[in-house]
Image (cartoon, rainbow, N blue to C red):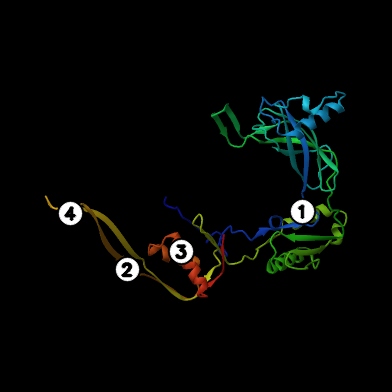
Amino acid sequence: MRAVFTLFLIAGLLPAPGAAGAATGIRLKEIVSLEGVRDNQLMGYGLVVGLAGTGDRRQTLFSAQSLTNLLERMGLTVSPTAIQVKNTAAVMVTSTLPPYAQPGSRIDCVIAAIGDAPSLQGGILLMTGLKGPDGQVYAVAQGPMVLGGFIAGSGASTQITNHPTVGRIPNGAIVERGAPSAVLGGQLHLQLSRADFTTAARVADAVNRKFGEVAHADNAALISVNLPPQFQKNVTQFVSEVENLTVEPDRDAAIVVNERTGTIVMGKDVRIAPVAIMQGNLTVEVQTTFAVSQPNALSQGTTQTVPQTNVNVKQEQSRNVLLKEGATVEELVRALTAVGSSPRDIISILQNLKDAGALDAELKVI
């Protein structure tokens, strides 16, 4: 099988300085978040009923026990060993509670089988409490599921499409308890999604240019902002204006190489020191064939197999690439492509450049 390689060059994506209509930066909303304003993960255990014989088998004991417990709460006592649960499946229900979610609002939930049910197609989730890490119920989920797959047929003639044991209920959970979110007070903390000292300093400068000396960078990932006096009674408006400020984040010069897929991703800020690259291929081909040697007529000899070996040596002419001071990765790729280098060749050349100290970037191999 011949591998297929892909080369991605992230160069020229940012507009040139002074270009008409060029963006001045990225909104803070895209790179920072407010400390304490976060999503909360919820999880619960429930039952899906109404399955057409595709529920848990006898090997899954907890689904039968859960069903008998449910029936007992409704006034019906049944032994777990005396019922068949082919139309019932035990599932885990997960959801994400957004910040400041209020009781009565609806959120999506995902249902996944935890027993040996082959499919949840056509099932209905019974009322399931979704708990947070503190053990409190924050939402209740119930309703019919939407599956992205199905199973058809039986025995050896079974066709499975996508994943029939995981489903989703859009707006299937009702929030019963408010999300534990931070109370916005006199000081806010902005958290960078990617820690960087230069970016943190630029964020603090952007806030100070807009509102005065109210912000300072505590470290590479945290910026403290004091609430200006004019926004003491309207914190939401202040946060909105801060989110819409724009900065230019600092980006590391990095090259990411995935040798399994042959993918190379390079940033435009990568610089290469003056270097000369020479590449050539030497191919040695050894072929062995077997000839049959027959003895002469009326002789006492026997038929023999005689190996014949041919050795061919082929060497391509070396390809030269010369890079001057301040060469960019775009120029490197263009030069390597011009001499016919494949992405696998480029991966090897980049590794050699890093070892030679000529590549001013971090080389990440994943």
Q: Position of residue 357 (x, y in %)?
A: 52, 75
Q: CA gap, disc 1 to disc 4?
A: 99 Å
> What residue is disc 3 on?
346
> What residue is disc 4 on?
301
> What residue is disc 2 on?
317
Label 3 with label 4: CB-CB less than 8 Å:
no
Out of 357 and 36, give the one closest to the viewer: 357
Q: CA gap, disc 2 to disc 3?
A: 18 Å
2 or 3: tag closer to the N-terminus:
2
Say what amino acid the circle numbered 4 marks.
Gly
Question: Considering the image in quadrants, where does the C terminus appear?
Answer: bottom right
Out of 329 and 20, give the one closest to the viewer: 329
Which residue is depicted at the point 78% across and 44% down?
Answer: 42
Q: Residues within 10 Å of mark 3 (few under 14, many from 20)?
A: some
**Which mark is in front, 4 or 2?**
4
Residue 240's label in the rendered image is: 1
2 or 1: tag closer to the N-terminus:
1
- Residue 272 visible at all: no
**Which mark is in front, 3 or 4?**
4
Label 2 with label 3: CB-CB less than 8 Å:
no
3 or 1: tag closer to the N-terminus:
1
Say what amino acid the circle numbered 1 marks.
Ser
Q: Position of residue 55 (x, y in %)?
A: 69, 29
Say what amino acid the circle numbered 3 marks.
Ile
4 or 2: tag closer to the N-terminus:
4
Q: Is residue 216 left or right of residue 303?
A: right
Q: Position of residue 185 (x, y in %)?
A: 87, 57
Label 1 with label 4: CB-CB less than 8 Å:
no
Say what amino acid the circle numbered 2 marks.
Gln
In this rendering, is residue 261 above or below 57? below
Q: Is residue 242 left or right of residue 265?
A: right
